[in-house]
Image (cartoon, helix red, strand yellow):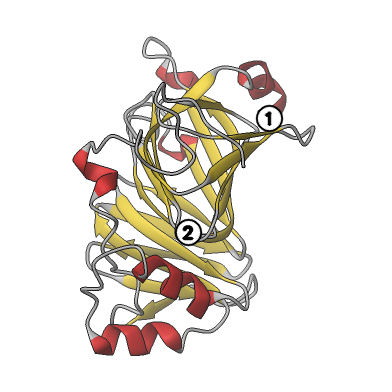
Amino acid sequence: MLLSLSAYANTPAATVVSLVGTVSAQLPDKTMRILCEGATLGAQETITTQKKSYVRLRFSDGGQITLRPQTSLRLDAYHYDEAKPAQDAIAFNLLKGGMRAISGLIGHRGNRDAYKAQAGVATIGIRGTRYGLLLCQDNCQGLLTDSTATDDNTQDPDQKHRASSLGNGLYLDVAAGEIVVSNDAGARDYRVGQYGYVGTLNVLPALLPQDPGLNQALPVSLDSGLSLHNLPGIGQDGACIAH
């Protein structure tokens, strides 16, 4: 499957539709570029956000992914042809940090297993879904503090306290639809309004009784269509400026 998908590695898969701060993309050969609004991304690229930086990607099948600060996501494979649903495929790996996703047509027509997300200790499949992931690796408190520093700080004190006490592992929530989370110990389904935790590859995914701190507001500029031309590092013609 991976060999057949390699032919599509250079095909644009996603477009940067909103960006705050500094975001980069790197190819396997270590070639790196700074991203701006309107930039396109292909399979095998790794997208990384710096501190106080966010990016929202829109895929050609209509799906979206928003990356939080200090996050890296590698797009391992992508193929979407409106006329060939049997060849649909998307595979990505959350290497660190946090993200929110809205699935597109891939996984909702033809093979529902065409959508695969990897995040450290687990693999995620979707069933018509909006969901969030946060991968903690001795850095969870810093990740969440950095996220709230960029929005309007509407997070309630109890939620902040829960977030500050998170240990290592993968945290997740489902806002719409359903996801199935699996690892070496087995699989669990999560539905709307549920929260989950996966500690290690050999421990079954668990159900959490409440939000561990994932529901933080994203910067308004990610959804407002605000022009980025006046932000540091963005030229008047939309080109990126390296400092």
Q: Which residue is mark 1?
A: 2
Q: Quadrant of residue 14?
A: top left
Closer to the camera, 72 or 171? 72
Q: Residues within 10 Å of mark 1 (few under 14, many from 20)?
A: few
Q: Residue at x 40, y 66 (%)?
A: 147
Closer to the camera, 14 or 77? 14
Distance between mark 1 and mark 2 Cα atoms? 30 Å
Q: Tell me if residue 214 can be seen.
A: yes
Give the residue type at disc 1. Leu
Q: Nearer the viewer, mark 1 or mark 2?
A: 2
The x, y position of residue 78, in whole percent, is 54, 28
88 in relation to 56, above or below: above
Q: Quadrant of the C terminus?
A: top right
Q: Earlier in the sequence, mark 1 or mark 2?
A: 1
Q: Which mark is residue 165?
A: none
Q: Residue at x 51, y 29 (%)?
A: 89
Q: Quadrant of the N terminus?
A: top right
Q: Residue at x 53, y 44 (%)?
A: 23
Q: Which residue is mark 2?
A: 69
Give the residue type at disc 2. Pro
The x, y position of residue 141, in whole percent, is 49, 80
